[in-house]
Amino acid sequence: VKALLPVADALAAMLQQAPPPPSSEHRPLLLACGRVLAQDIYTSIDVPGEDNSAMDGYALRAADAGQALPIHQRIPAGTSPEPLAPGSAARIFTGAPMPAGADAVVMQENGIESRGLLQVQGAVQVGDHIRPRGQDLRAGTRVLSAGHVLQPQDVGLLASIGLAQVPLYRPLRVALVSTGDELVEPAAGEPLPSGRLYNSNRYMLAALLQKLGMEVIDGGILPDDADATEQAFATLAASADCIVSSGGVSVGEEDHVRGAVERLGELSLWRLAIKPGKPLAFGRVKNTAFIGLPGNPTSSFVTFCVLARPFLLQAQGASTVSPRVLRGRADFSVARPGARCEYLRVRLTCESDVLVARRFANQSSGVLASVCYSDALAVIPAGTAVQQGDMVDLLLLEHLSQ
Ligand code: AMP
Ligand code: MG
């Protein structure tokens, strides 16, 4: 029997075979969130473009603060001020540009205004309450790099430099198929016949792909039949950048996915040292990348997050594809070191400033609720026992599904 492939080796091999990023297109900024930047973005302007007031108050020369100052100007945000005469002050509001000559802002609460004269309370330093020009971004700097997955705050930053159209990689087209004669689509009012099972993977995997900003081509449910599987894969390969299937990758004679891939292209890996999800398959159908996820929904979820997600992100042009790893204390033990790297579903709490991971009671790969009622996957490397209190790696589910 061939040894199971370690997760890290499988992932490295998959990433090496990831196709180059798709073509790019310019899209309006409002549609850019969650998508991958196709070019480095530089700013041609300083942000902010001028020194401006951080407070509602009075603009003045700090050296003049000891004397009563006539108020010669009123500068609301959005206006362009006159220079400030020495020995005078200007009423100014948050975000309004500083008048030339002024070097400080006194906040409203520290100014007493009577009969057009300002009396300042307390000390004033040059630079007080001024937001200097370019403090956010300097003209000429690189704001964001190609390969960055745009977050809401990034879209705000791009707006702040005046960008209206953003260069983005085209969304990856992923064909999604479920396999299994037992599968039935959820339908209102129809009882589930004996021996059948609702198709949960289709909905879960489509949602995971959509959250990655990818376009899902719905390949439906394939029967457990060699010819039908082969035909469907060949058709989908023509229109998709990648095919993702679930089920049918085990060793039973009702499992037809591997055979179809071998006949149409190449199976480059199969059977990984991962729990849950051992039978994951990877290869190509004609020239289209192929990922065969195991059928059990929890195995599908875990292998998607650990292996398919980084692969697909890279194929979509993203530069960071590995999930962030946190560390926390195990509130459980794993007595016997396993032959496979295990991804335990755990709940997290923070206790005395430390993350504590509690194992969901039923870790069966048939229990999808274990994922729903958890916050993270605790990574237990192959060959490792865990004692209660040991620190373990944690992958936040929130990070894995974005
Ligand atoms: P398989 O690898 O095809 O033998 O599937 C393993 C287990 O996962 C079986 O119990 C299947 O019924 C179940 N399964 C396969 N595909 C799905 C699916 N799309 N939704 C829910 N369960 C599934
Ligand atoms: Mg099956």
Image: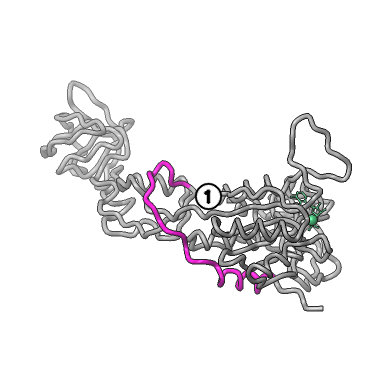
Residue 77 visible in rendering: yes
- Residue 357 lies in the magenta stretch: no
- Residue that lies at the very extreme toward the left in this rendered image: 85
- Residue that lies at the very extreme toward the bottom in this rendered image: 2
Q: In screen coordinates, is 141 left or right of 271?
A: left
Numbered range of the magenta stretch: 7-33
Q: In screen coordinates, is 162 left or right of 267?
A: left
The spot of residue 49 in percent (x, y) is 24, 46
The three-letter amino acid code for the residue at tag 1 is Gly
Which color scheme is applied?
one colour
Instruction: Locate the N terminus by quadrant.
Output: bottom right
**82 above or below 203?**
above
Does dot 1 land on a helix, a strand or a loop?
loop
Nearest the eye: 256 or 62: 256
The spot of residue 198 in percent (x, y) is 78, 43
The spot of residue 321 in percent (x, y) is 55, 62
- Residue 9 lies in the magenta stretch: yes
Crowd class of label 1 (few under 14; some 14 to 19; many from 20; radius 10 Å): many
**293 above or below 152?**
below
Q: In screen coordinates, is 89 left or right of 332?
A: left
Identify residue for label 1: 213
